[in-house]
């Protein structure tokens, strides 16, 4: 069970940390999110995608 949770940590980090950071940056910069999304929705989607790339690609950059 723990191994399966640990393998998904990049996605959890992407959604739990990077999502709110991206949302805050979008809000401070005054950028409008596309497709009528709110800043937090945009941040969570970006964090999810970045975390999934890190999980399946094996690295963050």
Image (tube, rainbow, N blue to C red):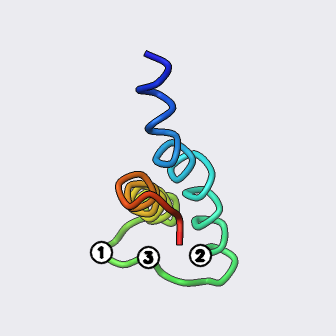
Q: What is the number of the mark on residue 33?
A: 3
Q: What is the number of the mark on residue 13?
A: none
Q: Residue at (36%, 78%) from the top-left corner?
A: 34
Q: Residue at (59%, 58%) from the top-left corner?
A: 18
Q: Residue at (53%, 72%) from the top-left corner?
A: 61
The answer for how far apart the CA atoms under marks 2 and 1 are is 14 Å
Q: Residue at (55%, 57%) from the top-left corner?
A: 19
4 to 16, vertically: above or below: above
Viewer-closest of 1 and 31:
1
The percent coordinates of residue 3 (x first, y second) are 46, 24
The percent coordinates of residue 11 (x first, y second) are 46, 47
Left or right: 48 as drawn, with respect to 26: left
Q: Residues within 10 Å of mark 2 (few under 14, many from 20)?
A: some
The percent coordinates of residue 56 (x first, y second) are 35, 54
Q: Which residue is mark 2?
A: 26
Local secondary structure at mark 3: loop
Q: Residues within 10 Å of mark 3 (few under 14, many from 20)?
A: some
Say which quarter of the image contains residue 36.
bottom left
- Looking at the image, how many numbered discs can be counted on the residues? 3
1 to 48, vertically: above or below: above
Local secondary structure at mark 1: helix
The answer for how far apart the CA atoms under marks 2 and 3 are is 8 Å
Viewer-closest of 42 and 55:
55
The answer for how far apart the CA atoms under marks 1 and 3 are is 7 Å
The percent coordinates of residue 20 (x first, y second) are 61, 56
Looking at the image, is mark 2 or mark 3 earlier in the sequence? 2
Q: Where does the N terminus fall, quadrant-wise?
A: top left
Left or right: 20 as drawn, with respect to 1: right
Whether the residues at callouts 2 and 3 have beta carbons within 8 Å, the answer is: yes
Residue at the far right in the pictured view: 28
Whether the residues at callouts 1 and 3 have beta carbons within 8 Å, the answer is: yes
């Amino acid at each position: 069970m723990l191994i399966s949770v640990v393998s998904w940590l990049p996605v959890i980090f992407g959604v739990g940390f990077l999502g709110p950071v991206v949302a805050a940056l979008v809000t401070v910069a005054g950028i409008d999110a596309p497709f009528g999304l709110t800043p937090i929705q945009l941040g969570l989607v970006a964090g999810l995608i970045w975390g999934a790339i890190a999980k399946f690609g094996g690295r963050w950059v």
